Amino acid sequence: NISILPPTEAKTLSEPQDIVVYVVEPIGNEIFVYFSEADARYCLRTDPKVTCRPGDRMQIRFDLDSLYFFDTRSDTRYV
């Protein structure tokens, strides 16, 4: 998960990343935003108040204290 947080709510932020949104999936109490950065594709979840559409360019930062990575083939979690 990658969540969009105001800078005041996150402890350790990454450098800004430029992304391009390609799918927005409202799920009710949150929104899944699928995006690409370089040649990779990712999904983040965010508050439903965040507005974006496919094709939008956004700049995001990651809360480095809350990142988890998983191998989709083995389901292994990397910290």
Image (cartoon, rainbow, N blue to C red):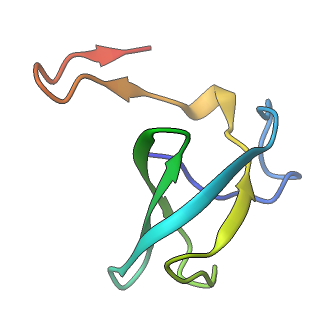
Image: 78 above or below 20: above
Residue at 63% across / 54% down in the picture? 19
Image: 79 above or below 17: above
Quadrant of residue 55 within the rendered picture? bottom right
Using residue 56 as the reference point, say whether residue 11 is left or right of it: right
Using residue 13 as the reference point, say whether residue 53 is left or right of it: left
User: x%, y% of residue 65?
Assistant: 65, 27
- Quadrant occupied by the N terminus: top left
- Quadrant occupied by the C terminus: top left
Residue at 40% across / 46% down in the picture? 41
Image: 33 above or below 12: below
User: x%, y% of residue 24?
Assistant: 42, 77
User: x%, y% of residue 23?
Assistant: 39, 73
Residue at 55% across / 39% down in the picture? 38
Using residue 1 as the reference point, say whether residue 50 is left or right of it: right
User: x%, y% of residue 31?
Assistant: 44, 74
Using residue 72 as the reference point, say whether residue 7 is left or right of it: right
